[in-house]
Image (tube, grey):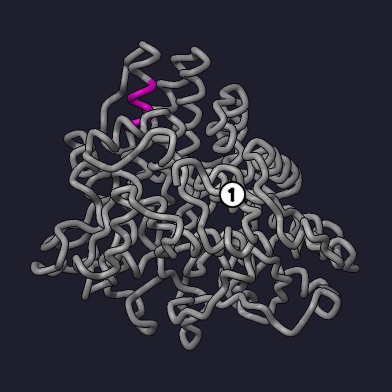
Amino acid sequence: MEKIFKKVKRKVPVLAFALALGALYACDKDFLDVEPQAATEETFFETEEDAIRSVNAIYGNLREWKVAAFAHLALTHVASDNAEKGSDPGDAAFMNDFDNFTASPTQFILDDYWTGQYQAINLTNQAITNIPPIPMDENLKNRLIAEAKFLRAHHYFNLVRAFGDVPLITKISKEPTAEELNPGRTPKEQVYAQIITDLDSAAMILPVRYGAADVGRATKGAALSLLAKVEMYQKNWQQVFDLTQQVMGLGYSLTPKYYDIFRISGENNSESIFEVQAQTIPGNCGASNSQWAETQGVRGQFGWGFFIPTTDLENAYEPGDERKDATILYRGEVTPEGDKINDNAPNPRYNQKAYVPASVTQECGYAKDQNIRILRYAEVLLMHAEAANELGNTQAALDALNQVRNRAGLSDVTVTDKDELRNIIWHERRVELALESGDRFFDLVRQGRAAEVFQAQGKNFIAGKHEVFPIPQRQIDLSAGKLTQNPGY
């Protein structure tokens, strides 16, 4: 793991296209700077080490402020019914726009999200374009390109769910055309097709597992799992069933105790399929740790106190569900690690999955050593259950679903009615994955329940509008109007 971190922080060339370049700006919260440098692909992409470094930079960018922190958490956690802004009422009050669905196209967090994802895609495109001619070990070359394709798919999946049609850019040209410099929006169906192509290609090349020095890199299981998720969002149930079946045969297993998944000792365990690596390296605070954890830690004690669990999420857990205590950290409680949460903390609840104990190094301010879980085996089981139910294979659905429930200390579900079982699986997905990578808002949209759920909670959700976020006005302006706005904004 440390090997990846040490190779990430360096001068990686960024051939910025208009969308990314126009929105990059200096920010003292950035903890991993992947910025434009004087080097070009002609002077950088020459050796095997250059190829490795270029892909490591993509992994490093997964921790970048716009990718992992406020922008990501606003569009995923706060926009859902799982979390609200938290912290002090007057601190970052603009976050309430995402809770209330009142964010306008000029909201800068939208531009941060867009820019962060395209900055990452730019890095992937550099690697995919420039690694092939390098004289180096062919197996390593193919693997690095496959890793970059997996990561490009990950970022485009984030974009297409958030905005719908988005510019699809898959290469870096030495002499870019006007269209390449200022692309329009690509129909989301084409974006999804490219995501699937990238993941299919990656899955054929990536290994099932790595040695200790490369833990954290994308694997075959990661590519197949993300592909299953992409197919799920398009309701291609047979593909979801088949893909999850493949992953279920790759040797993953549920961690016996749910709480252990989210502790530092539980990182990259038998349930982990893909997670963003975060580790404080003494003397190098800017390169490797996670502001994802810092922004959500108990305010004044472990972090900034944002993105706190809602009462609605708290009430969603069944009696005896062990996931509740592992997900929600309460004011005044004593953690299993022995930390007493301040009795006077500003908020009653915090995200326990982002909690980093006081015993972990504080060298970089608040402790930030907390990996970001992106894909877990439990989610694969729940995707398998959902697909099996939609295909009429009730027993397979129950078998997968009950593995997840039993681990949480809950009894088997025996329901056989398809509609009732679907709702149970959806509920399990919510409580199992709450406050992790942030699928709840997008899940409600794909399930066709967003308006019903959010309007019942008194939120300003308008059907036919708020299923996607507005295209950032800054990007429309930079494109001289070539980018068009989503309906209703």
The reply to whether residue 351 is visible in this rendering is no
Badge count = 1
Q: Is residue 138 magenta?
A: no
| Image location of residue 268, percent across then percent down | 49, 56
Q: Quadrant of the N terminus?
A: bottom right
Q: Position of residue 338 (x, y in %)?
A: 19, 67
Seen as rendered, the residue at the extreme front is 481
Residue reaching furthest bottom?
A: 283
Residue visible at 36% across and 12% down? Answer: 416
**Viewed as shown, does residue 311 lie left or right of 93?**
left
In the image, is residue 17 above or below residue 37?
Answer: above
Closer to the camera in the image, 46 or 160: 160
Neighbours of disc 1 within 10 Å: few (<14), some (14-19), many (20+): some
Task: From the image, give the main secondary structure of the stretch colored magenta.
Answer: helix
Give coordinates of residue 469: x percent, y percent: 46, 48
Residue 188 appears in view: yes
Q: Is residue 52 left or right of residue 448?
A: right
* Residue matched to label 1: 484
Up/down of 362 relative to 212, above or below? below
Q: Nearer the viewer, residue 36 or 47?
A: 36
Q: Residue at x 59, y 32 (%)?
A: 231
Q: Quadrant of residue 56?
A: bottom right
Q: Is residue 411 above or below residue 353?
A: above
Provide the secondary structure element on which disc 1 rests: loop
Magenta part of the protein: which range?
422-427
Tag 1: residue type? Thr
> In terms of image quadrants, where is residue 458?
top left
Could you say where residue 258 lies in the image, as x and y percent from the top left?
33, 46
